Image (cartoon, rainbow, N blue to C red):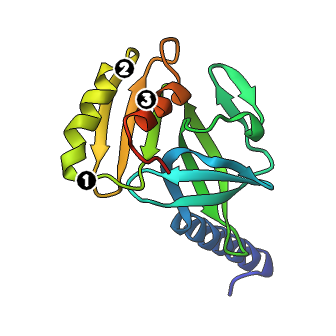
Amino acid sequence: MIKASKMNQLILILVFLLTSLIYAQNKNTIIGTVGKEHMVGNKLVICELGTQACMFFDLAPQLKIKVNNRYLQPQQLQVGWYVEVDTAKTDNGNYIIRNIKVDPTQTIFCFSELDEKQMKPLQSLLTTIKGIDSVKVFLQSKQVFVKYNPREVNYRQIESNLKQAGYKIE
């Protein structure tokens, strides 16, 4: 016969294991950029790479955002910055950001229109902009991933070049 204290320990271990399993099933890593809406109330907007979706995420209270060796508040994140966020589903069904990595040398542009005929001209345009290191087009999701040197060019300048060339950015 198992003593009450042993039974309590077994129950605690079982609860811990089940909680860990549920957390692991509801954890997700999202790769994208800070959306044009940026912050809506207490939620951060992330536009996900490979989809045409922009999603709203709650922020964990203890969340620390480090960019270039400085800690920033969520409101200080810039539109277009590349992010990798670890999320978890909360009890009420929302997703909360538990960890965030920011890389201001990369971005993703989302287009309302982008077809195969526009792919090569788009790549040519972007690779001629001083400071852009590499470009990868995601035709299915109408997105382009750009690595660049922020000392030579910034997100707004790249965006301006794209708009002047007639591309419709979301």
Kind of residue at badge 2:
Ile
The answer to whether the residue labelled 1 contacts the one labelled 3, judged by CB atoms less than 8 Å apart, is no
Task: Write down the quadrant of residue 3 in the picture.
Answer: bottom right
Q: Do the residues labelled 3 and 2 touch (CB within 8 Å)?
A: yes
Q: Name the residue under label 3.
A: 161
| Left or right of 63 on screen, residue 113 | left
Give the mark nearest the N terminus, 1 or 3: 1
Which element carries disc 1, helix, strand or loop?
A: loop
Residue topped by disc 1: 115
CA distance for labels 2 and 1? 21 Å
Mark number for residue 23?
A: none
Residue 149, percent from left and from top: 45, 17
Near-viewer residue (137 or 16): 137
Callout 1 environment at 10 Å: few (<14), some (14 to 19), or many (20+)?
few
Kind of residue at disc 3: Asn
Q: In which quarter of the image is the N terminus?
A: bottom right
Residue tagged 2: 129
The kind of secondary structure element at disc 2 is: loop
- Disc 3 crowd rating (10 Å Cα; few below 14, some 14-19, many 20+) is some
